[in-house]
Image (cartoon, rainbow, N blue to C red):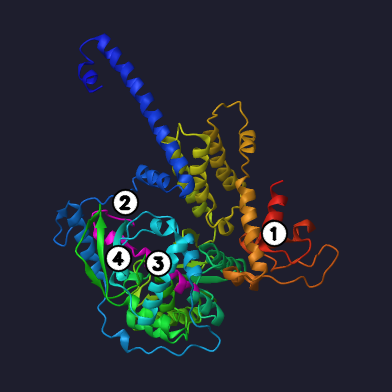
Amino acid sequence: MKRAWKVRKNSPALLSQYKLLFSEFNLKKKAAENSFISQLYENGRGNNFKQLWNFIRSECGNDREIPPLQDSHGQLVFSSTQKANVLNENYANIFVPQTKDTHEIIPSLLRGDLKAFSFSAKSIENWIRKIPQSTSINTDNFSIATLKLFPDMFSLYLLKIFEKSLSSKCLPSDWKTAFVSPVFKKGDKSLAENYRPISLTSGVCRVFEHLFADYINSCFNKINFIFRGQHGFRAGYSCESQLASLAQEISQAVDERDQIDVIFLDFKKAFDVVPHYQLCSKLANVGIDPSVFYWIQNFLFSRRQAVKVDENLSSFIEVPSGVPQGSVLGPMLYIVHSSDFHHGLVSNVRKFADDSATSKKIRDVSDCILLQKDLDRIEIWCILNGMTLSIGKCQIVSFCNKHEKIIFDYKINGESIPRTDSASYLGVIFSEKFSFSSHIESVIKKANSALYFIKRVFAKSSKEVKEKVYFALVRSKLEYASSVWDPHSSKHCNNLEMIQRRAARFVVGNYNLTSSVSEIIENLKWDSLSSRRQFARLKNFYLVYNGIGGWADLFEYIDPPARLGRSERPYSVRTTIPRTDVGKYSFVTRSVNEWNNLPDTVFNNAPVSFSLFKQRLQKHLFK
């Protein structure tokens, strides 16, 4: 082929021959690519399609390859080892040296209403089976894949090791060592500060961490330790439940012609700077089993890490602060550290791990002053707990439909918080007029971009592969937190459906304009996006109605009917009569109207379990 390219211009015959060879090469290349993708799909049936997603990531340009980085002198470094050391030096500069010894902390005795920590070979075996398959060699030179070969046998050995570790209040050094994978966030790729550290820790230790996490979660739920505004890393709580709660508070205020100020807070390197002394002090006062406290205390003590780039390791450094990102206990320990963040605040506080939003209705300047006092208390909390706010990344949005808003200069540490007319929180764009048009347009743009990508990469793939990647890469974007921003205008609804219609033609490979795309979608057995959003909304409203998890925050917006008339049924509810479209199309109002109109077949033999409700609702909506 290379020789044919060089001599192609020597004569018309050679040029014609080159074109034939080039055409044949392209056909074979596309056939090989299609065969490769099909093989990835078939091999992925047993391991969550991991290789397929890795291939997609590489095609997207997100294969995690680290480009040349700037060192501390501004010079570019190119070798993998040099890049690993530059990244590790950057992380070392983030960590905060500890001034107090955590070993001085004495935990409270076990509370009378809590049980002691216990585990068995069976519970270890269960977690070995639950942990996702992984062939990565961890810091203890042992892979999860090896454990999963004989989980019943390995659980007996691990039982003895775990019992010894717990009784001695000590962990092997390999369990406290992490290989850090740098993951690019955004900005300049040559700057080490733009890479988030994700720790790969001991697989054996992670099994033990899951046992501790189960115990601590059960204790926290028993004593209601975690405040209701924290929706991160909790069963029954999610980004969507928190977004729905915030959106409902804003929509009600705007509908009542009030102003509500929401301040979105951004903590600087939150997971990396958590002081171990303050964290352990808070955990010690909970009243959990002291042996669990001592084990976690040692889990945090004398940790070390090295950055891994292209299988090359940097030198090891000590990790004096923070909770390891990528570990099982890390997120839970961060929640413990921030458990008193809301104390003494008069505004509504919402947190999803380190993402925070505080809100308050503003009727006059006195309300602004109260919100400013809350910011002052948050500033004091940060000082006492070793945290720092990135004030330049914090945002204030005043939501209202008034012509004249009350504008107040909110400050943190003497610096004004930037004011904006829209802000993104947990992936959803909130605008000051409380219209989700900007967010919907952003969703459409991202989904179209993703659809174009899969059309380019998977053009010759099988129907099954195309459908799989459409669901994962396109439809997931169209449905993230859709209960919150579900559009009511026909324009937005049609634009969203148009993406699915184009995707349907792509999946079956039928671009014939005389073919009915509605029939294609029906043959694929795809439900319309609008009906799927309605299903998601009513499914979530079931959780509101029954006060389950994070959706219980919205229960205050509904009431039983004043009296049961002929049209009302035992499960009927009512809510505030809206004054504007903002209130009319809010999550609660739309859901209440649709909930009350559901047929009796959905609620027969009440109370109905969540799984049974979903089955009946699905049967009703997707006839």
Q: Distance between the residues labelled 1 and 2?
A: 42 Å
613 relative position to 48: left or right: right
Q: Is residue 384 above or below residue 50?
A: below
Q: Give the residue pinned by disc 4.
A: 178
- Residue 379 visible, this angle: no
Q: Where is residue 132 in the image (x, y as percent from the top left)?
A: 45, 57
Going from the N terminus, do you reach mark 2 or mark 3 first?
2
Going from the N terminus, do you reach mark 3 or mark 1 first?
3
Range of the magenta residues? 185-214
Which corner quadrant of the image does residue 30 belong to? top left
Going from the N terminus, do you reach mark 4 or mark 1 first?
4
Q: Does the magenta stretch include residue 604?
A: no
Q: Which is more foreground, mark 4 or mark 1?
A: 4
- Cβ atoms under marks 4 and 3 closer than 8 Å: no
Q: Element under label 4? A: strand
Using the image, tell me which numbered label, if any, was put on residue 60: none
Q: Position of residue 131 (x, y in %)?
A: 45, 60
- Total numbered badges shown on the rendered structure: 4
Q: Give the residue pinned by disc 1.
A: 612
Q: Give the residue pinned by disc 2.
A: 64
Going from the N terminus, do you reach mark 4 or mark 2 first?
2
Q: Give the residue pinned by disc 3.
A: 206
Q: Residues within 10 Å of mark 3 (few under 14, many from 20)?
A: many
